[in-house]
Image: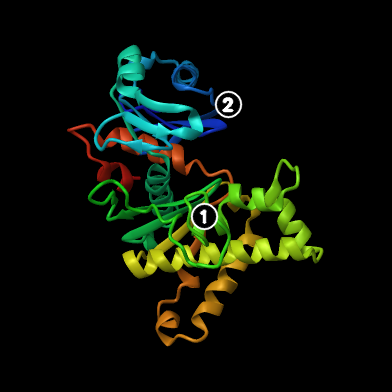
């Protein structure tokens, strides 16, 4: 076990589970824990406290000995704070994690939107695994119940003027497409979001998108249309991210990426189809810039730990990303 002076915890608090990692001062994951997430602000706080205490017990330290705690959550996060708003999938309208967690544990706490935290973690993992080809810019496209993206440039998150950078799920790419919950038709999320696909599939299943792919392989026409729409939506999101931010790499993450190569190959085919009639799109090599986050990756929790580290005045985020 490394020394305890630089230990940090990062938590990815999702609607169904909380994934947490204990990392050392250079971002190496030392321990990992998952638990079901409670519903509502009080239960969310208790989940976080329980997971932090379990990880610190495993490390043989008191929670107050941690250098920082970073928390990634859905919803809106006030920049530079740990105040969360509108985390509807958790039943949270308002929550100050610094007051509810940091004060209780005696540890500095920072928070970030979960997708943006995952983008930072994906960049750090890629830099560690492929140090000679680490991209200057990376877009992380989260494919889960909904669709959203996070952008990292030179190791720093790009949040935009009002913190809305990467909210691409409600860009309409097919005016005649399916109705989206936002009121538009043919949004990327309406085509590629797991929740929208499950609703349109309409069959009871623990893994509806997997069922869609299996049924499509068997020739089911409804499943084939849904699978085609998913590839169309994801490929449109990739084009948006590259054409607007010119990201070196687009990494696919989120629950739908458990489909693995079946998903990636469909998206690559859709990207190649869109580029067939355009020399400009072909010149961008869209398919070559697409990567899939490894299964069971701790990217979101690791990114949250790095967010926590970014608030320390004596050690910036960039050092954590490049050392080791």
Count of marks, rendered view: 2
Extreme right residue here? 218
Q: Residues within 10 Å of mark 2 (few under 14, many from 20)?
A: some
Which is more toward the observer, 11 or 217? 217
Disc on the earlier residue, 2 or 1: 2
Residue at 59% x, 65% y is 231
Q: Secondary structure at mark 1?
A: helix
Q: Is residue 27 above or below residue 144?
A: above
Tag 2 residue = 36
Q: Is residue 162 above or below residue 13?
A: below
Tag 1 residue = 189
User: Alpha carbon of mark 2 to alpha carbon of mark 1: how far?
Assistant: 25 Å
In what quadrant of the picture does the C terminus appear?
Answer: top left
In what quadrant of the picture does the N terminus appear?
Answer: top left
Provide residue 91's location: percent of width, then percent of height: 48, 27
Provide residue 202's location: percent of width, then percent of height: 72, 48
Quadrant assignment, res 110? top left
Extreme front residue here? 183
Provide residue 199's location: percent of width, then percent of height: 65, 48
Q: Is residue 85 visible in the rendered structure shown here?
A: yes
Quadrant assignment, res 79? top left
Colouring convention used in this rendered image of the protein: rainbow
CB of mark 2 within 8 Å of CB of mark 1?
Answer: no
Which is more toward the observer, 234 or 314? 234
Q: Is residue 1 above or below residue 186?
A: above
Quadrant assignment, res 102? top left
Residue at 37% x, 53% y is 166
In the image: residue 286, left or right of residue 192? left
């Amino acid at each position: 076990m490394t020394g305890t002076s630089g230990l940090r915890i990062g938590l990815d608090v999702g609607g169904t589970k909380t994934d947490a990692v204990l990392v050392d001062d250079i971002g190496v994951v030392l321990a990992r824990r998952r638990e079901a997430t409670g519903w509502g602000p009080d239960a969310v706080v208790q989940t976080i406290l329980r997971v932090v205490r379990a990880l610190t017990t495993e490390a043989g330290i008191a929670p107050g000995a941690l250098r920082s705690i970073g928390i990634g959550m859905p919803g809106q996060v006030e920049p530079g704070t740990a105040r969360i708003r509108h985390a509807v999938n958790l039943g949270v309208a308002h929550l100050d994690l610094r007051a509810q967690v940091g004060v209780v544990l005696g540890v500095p706490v920072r928070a970030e939107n979960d997708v943006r935290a995952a983008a930072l973690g994906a960049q750090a993992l890629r830099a560690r695994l492929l140090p000679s080809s680490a991209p200057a810019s990376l877009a992380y496209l989260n494919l889960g119940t909904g669709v959203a993206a996070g952008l990292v440039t030179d190791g720093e998150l790009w949040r935009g003027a009002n913190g809305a950078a990467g909210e691409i799920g409600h860009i309409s790419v097919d005016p005649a497409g399916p109705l989206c919950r936002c009121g538009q038709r043919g949004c990327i999320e309406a085509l590629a979001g797991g929740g929208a696909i499950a609703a349109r599939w309409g069959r009871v299943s623990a893994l509806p998108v997997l069922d869609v792919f299996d049924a499509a392989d068997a020739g089911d026409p409804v499943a084939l249309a849904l699978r085609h729409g998913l590839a169309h939506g994801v490929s449109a999101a990739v084009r948006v991210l590259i054409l607007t931010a010119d990201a070196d790499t687009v990494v696919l993450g989120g629950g739908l990426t458990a489909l693995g190569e079946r998903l990636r190959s469909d998206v690559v085919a859709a990207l190649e189809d869109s580029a067939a009639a355009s020399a400009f799109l072909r010149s961008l090599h869209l398919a070559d810039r697409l990567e899939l986050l490894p299964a069971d990756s701790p990217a979101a929790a690791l990114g949250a730990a790095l967010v926590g580290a970014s608030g320390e005045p004596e050690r910036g985020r960039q050092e954590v990303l490049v050392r080791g």
